[in-house]
Amino acid sequence: MRSVGCVVVGGGPAGLAAARTAARYGVRVLLVDENAELGGQYYRQMPAAFGSGAALGRETREGRALIDEVRALGVETSLGATTWAIFDQRTVAIATADHTERVAAHAVVLATGAYDRPVPFPGWTLPGVVTAGGAQNLMKGYGVLPGRRVLIAGSGPLLLVVAHYLLQGGAEIAAICEAAPMRRLWRHAPRMLPHLDVVQRAYRYRGEIARAGVPFFTGHVIRRALGAGEVTGAVVSPCAADWTPLLGDRTFDVDTIVVGYGFVASLELARLAGCGERWDDARGGWVATRTREMESTVPGIFIAGDGAGVAGSATALEEGHLAGLAVAARFGRLTSREYSREASRGRGRLLHLAGLRRVLDELYRYGPGLSALAEDDTILCRCEEVTHAQAAEAVREGADHLYGVKVWTRAGMGRCQGRMCGPALGELIGRVTGRPAALAGVFTPRPPVKPVRLAALAEERS
Amino acid sequence: MSPEARIPNVPRGRALTIVVDGVRVSAFEGESIAAALLAEGRRATRWTAGSGEPRGYLCGMGLCQDCLVTVDGAPNVRACMTPVREGLRVESQRGFGEWSQ
């Protein structure tokens, strides 16, 4: 088994920033990502075969510059490679299509990012329902539209960005349904003053949407995807402040529904490694417990970016930088004085960004009323095809934890390993038991945390 | 859905041909199987083992396992994470899929 200074898992903003900083101070870094290109979701790059410089938007171009820097620093990369486990604290198991490798790392930075919160609603399994992240990847990564006539439903600034890409690409948007009420925005004005660039960009996107004649409904949620075999329509309705759907259905003829009700941190590897986590009400989900150096509760394992708790790409860059600095300091690559100076600058920038995050978390605070969308026969666990009624029955019979519902119904036992049903199942358990969703716990991850080919496991290289 | 969903004026890789359920489909080097299928308006990638319902591209980042297809005889390949190559055989998948030659 070979050994490296630092393994960084995830090549998005946090992972790239961590790798850059650690490598600048002379740490030997191995950067691992499951995709064919570095960049992650936010900085998603077009394939190399599309030619250098191929890009649809500013995020791709910004990411390219950072990736070039990381490469110039001599960071070793392993792409198309799945990190499927962390053993013995810092032994990182990595699999490609045809072999697996274990790497002993002195330090590990987990920058695993986040994924769109899966929200079960009637018809959400139909082809043509895609997540906001999935729609973005298709457009930013391949220049392909997810559909021709699209309804966007969800909450948060990403809806505006998806709409921007769709309109630029020539798609028609039937409507945008933002769940948050977005009333009395002026209340937030003083706290948004230091972040005028963000406000300006939001207004630019809103202007573009208005000019295209796209109706923008606030306080509305998706109710149902219509269609047999694939999406042919969408039903939306107004919602209460906690996003509970209300009466007043409205139907749109669309071929695609883009859904984006915020994000869930990808904590599976951290969880497997035994890193501590806690429930965060503002984000409606689990976040990693960390020191201000971004170190988890397991010594030598750092967690940076959305994979620790969703806070966006700017924060991810700073957290990655802080993790990289801390790793370099452990190797004695900078004096404690240099470290304190650099780290306090980074923390200052994080504090600035936290002000923006607090406003966004208030504006788009997750509404647990969404869990009322599912009907009895709505699929909750997509892999094992467990319905809402089956899961609810298990909870009423006494399964008050994710693990119990899993044993009872097989929910969470499929190939996605509970990523798609876990969050909604937690909400359902909370709803039926009348207790906080946090008490429903999490699915225990087991290696491999993502499906890996047996042929790859059989071929271990050292 | 209209057959061509590729955004105009985007530089792409070399044109190539893949075979989807026995039908020749054009694609571009670098595209994922999912991108190539969606660009042609093919949205259902598989039918589930239990209810036999269609599923397709959802998360686009290799997590949800809903865009599984059979590639060159190997089942359960994520269309969103797998690049196309000249002559690649893609079959939409029923249930958990089967190995074939």
Image: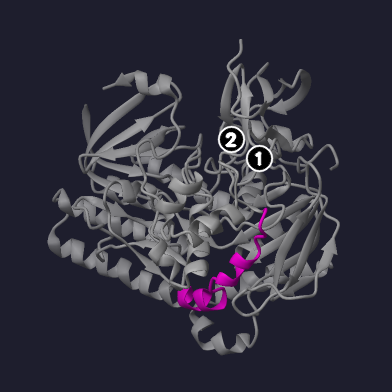
**Mark on residue A47?**
2
Q: Position of residue A220 (x, y in %)?
A: 71, 72
- Is the residue at mark 1 from the same chain as the one at mark 2? yes
Q: Nearer the viewer, residue A76 or A384?
A: A384
Q: Position of residue B22 (x, y in %)?
A: 76, 18
First of labels 1, 2 by sequence position: 2
- The residue wearing badge 1 is A142
**Residue B60 higher or lower than A171, as above or below:** above
Categorize mark 2 by other alpha carbons within 10 Å: few (<14), some (14-19), many (20+). many
Secondary structure type for disc 2? loop
- Give, as a three-letter code, the residue at label 1: Tyr
- Give, as a three-letter code, the residue at label 2: Pro
Categorize mark 1 by other alpha carbons within 10 Å: few (<14), some (14-19), many (20+). many
Disc 1 chain ID: A
Which quadrant of the figure contains the C terminus of chain A? top left
Q: Are marks 1 and 2 in contact (CB under 8 Å)?
A: yes
Residue shown at 20%/50% (left/top)? Answer: A300
**Residue A360 higher or lower than A424, as above or below:** below
Residue shown at 35%/32% (left/top)? Answer: A94
Q: Is residue B26 visible?
A: yes
Left or right of residue B51: residue A232: right
Left or right of residue A312: residue A336: left
Disc 2 chain ID: A
Query: Magenta segment range?
Result: A356-377
Which quadrant of the figure contains the N terminus of chain A? top left
**Residue A355 higher or lower than A426, as above or below:** below
Mark 1–mark 2 Cα distance, whole angstroms, equals: 7 Å
